[in-house]
Amino acid sequence: MRPSAISHQPSAISHQPSVSHRSFLGAGRLQHRGVRFSTQETVDFVIVGSGAAGGIIAKELSTAGLKVVVLEQGPWLKQEDFRHDEVDVIFRNGLSNDPAKTHVTFRKTEQEEAKEGAGQFIYHRLVGGGSVCFTANYWRLHEVDFIERSKLGTVAGSGLVDWPIRYQDLEPYYTRAEWELGVSGQAGASPFDPPRSRPYPLPPMPVKSSGVLFERAAKKLGLHPFPAPMAIISQPYRGRTPCQHCGYCLGFGCEYGAKSSTLFTTIPTAVATGKCEIRSESYARKIEVNDRGRVTGVVYFDRDKVEQFQPARAVVVCCNGSETPRLLLMSQSNLFPNGLANSSGVVGKYLMFNGYSANSGVFEGQLNEYKSIMTTRILHDFYESDPKRGFYGGGGIDARFMAYPVLWALGGLPKDGPQWGLEYKHMLRDYYTHVMNVDGHTTSLPVETNSISLDPTVKDAWGLPAMRVTYRDHPDDIATMKFFQARCREILEAAGAKKMWSEPVKEQNFAAHLLGTCRMGDDPKSSVIDRYHRAHDVRNLFIADGSSMVTGGRGQPTATIQALAFRAGESIAGFARRNEM
Amino acid sequence: MYSDRRAFLALSGSALAAIWLAADPEEVRAALRHAQSAASRSPNAWQYLTPEQAADVEAIASQIIPTDDTPGAKEAGVVYFADQSLATWAAAQREPFTSGLNDLNQQVARRSPGTTRFAALPAGQQTALLHEVEKTPFFQMMRAMTFQGFFGNPEYGGNRDKAGWRLIGFDDRYAWQPPFGDYDAEVVTGGRQ
């Protein structure tokens, strides 16, 4: 889901907004809904993070009768708080992490000193998290994703391993996610799709002009385009209004509630049990342990930056592949001097971004890609790694909307021509409603030195160590991006683009997917959690989110994060019921 | 039902386009004439900028998005966006803005002795100077500010009369039904129609 244009904007206004002026959003943020628990009461679970995974596990545990407090950094917004304001959402970090408060440093290798502003890493800070703001692409992993190490052998310079579970283990939970949340798509439309136990609950979204052009071109090339599965409801579903095609999915919250975020699906169900408190604007800083090595609860800052402690029988960490390892590393203690659940030393390591290649084409007719959802047609013909290519890697290709007006004007046009002035103005005028993208979404190998760690000097606005990102794409990831760039350009050409340009493939310093940093595995020496999402080192600590992923898939991780969350929630409820914590 | 809606949308779409295309540039200019030039405003008109800074910002923004037969940064009020932003949410940019603009004006003085402000340079010299500095962080900041002011929501002070959106054909209706463009209008596939 990398919003392509965001990565190319100059570091002007966007990177350093003032901390003293709040976003326009969040008018209703102080209104609480549902039960409240006292910090004197030991609840069954604290869940840290209310996003794609936490919002599901909250529902699974509370509907099982367990008492749950969900700590969420960001505000609890309502449907009507979501507005079409590009300046606020994209440039003032209205819904996402604000680098002026939650500082992030970046470096390519461990030998370098990490610097602020050297990279941009987006995750969302509000109830519902990234599930509110993602593009809503909803791709299942394929069977091969779980077993690439056995199938392909080792890949030099990487820590590629098999998952401890298989596609068959996860399939029922993909199905639950699609039905409980509401996903639109066409089962069986792709010959490369893995087996599924049920069709999608909703028919595909209406095709856009980009989808029509893409489908024609891909078929001409002998490829197999199909309707994109999207977590956006194409028809009324479980009391929710269907998509009105406003065009503001990527990065924005849905004012119609049609995007199937946890905010509009599982979280209301959890709150309705009377067993689950969503405690918004609560920023976790440490998970406490007792002298027996069990977690006892979570220390957090409330909205007034006052420290609080919520005791619990067990803790579930669902803070995204960025903040989850950071919280564990900040939870050092005498028993866990290298960070909680980190006897393996693997916490924070094997970070994966997913590769990306962006290609634009201008067409004779009007496409008006700014209307409706981001993408309606995709293909998976190059999904699997093919040894004949000479490098590891695979991915998917989609036809997609390029960007909102400001983002597009800043970074959407060819870089080798003028970037301002009359000629530039005329390109803006002539291309906007005639342009589409064909983009590659590809693998990132798990590399041990790519990591999230604590910055030794930079602190955030709460005085906590800033997140430090160390990342350099594996050479095979770069080769894969270039391979996909060439395939995307063939499609644009076959579609009849009269002008075409591509973003040069280069090592990435931008990501909205932050995966693999607390990987799942059977061996406590080389992984952080077991196949049921329990930390190897701590019996009553569980982790489920993008950090659990052993491999990064092909660029659309949310369906897998949510399937894992449904499966983890069911397992954890069972452990609680059987007193196995 | 579907074809009715389609026809309606096709009609309303082309009608909107026609209004814009048919507008006489002179009428457009007349409509915008009441927007006085930035420099002639009283100091009280600005929340953060000095009148001299405002004139420079407007001159730079007008180089980035010039006015021709359609409105440019000047008519869209990009300078008001810059002023409002620096006064409020972009306050952290004040220092780089001020020092960057001072640097630029020092180059103006070196280049044209007797001239101290960018806005006072002849247009051709403005263009030439900006080409020289276009890789600097200051110019990149001004470029970003200009596009944000030209294409951002009008409530931020720029994009007046939706001039930016009209230029590129973006319609801020935020609710649509298919067909969305020419090519999906040609076929009916995949959707629920």
Image (cartoon, coloured by chain):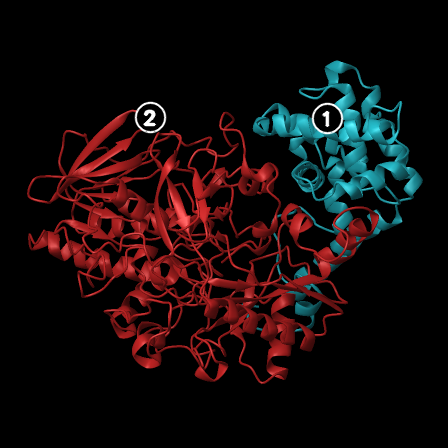
**Badge 2: few (under 14), some or many (20 or more) residues near its Cα, within 10 Å?**
few
Q: Is residue A268 visible?
A: no
Measured as percent of width and height from the top left, residue A479 is found at: 52, 71
Q: Is residue A13 left or right of residue A508?
A: right
Residue that mark 1 sits on:
B102
The numbered mark 1 sits on a residue in which chain? B
Furthest-front residue in view?
A111
Residue at 89% across, 22% down? B114
Q: Are marks 2 and 1 on the same chain?
A: no
Q: Residue at x 84, y 20 (%)?
A: B40
Residue carrying label 2? A305
Q: CA distance from mark 2 to mark 1?
A: 39 Å
Q: Position of residue A119 (x, y in %)?
A: 50, 47
Image mark for residue A16? none
User: For numbered disc 2, what is the local secondary structure?
Assistant: loop
Question: Which quadrant holds residue B121?
Answer: top right
Q: Amino acid at mark 1?
A: Asn
Q: Residue at x 36, y 67 (%)?
A: A158
Asked if residue A420 is positioned above or below residue B107 in the image, the reply reads below
Instruction: Give percent across and percent down for residue A127.
Output: 37, 42
Q: Is residue A283 visible?
A: yes
Most foreground residue, B170 or A538:
A538
Chain B shade: cyan
Quadrant assignment, res A427: bottom right
Q: Is residue B169 left or right of residue A388?
A: right
Q: Residue at x 50, y 52 (%)?
A: A510
Give the amino acid type for the residue marked by disc 2 in the picture.
Lys
For chain A, the rendered hue is: red
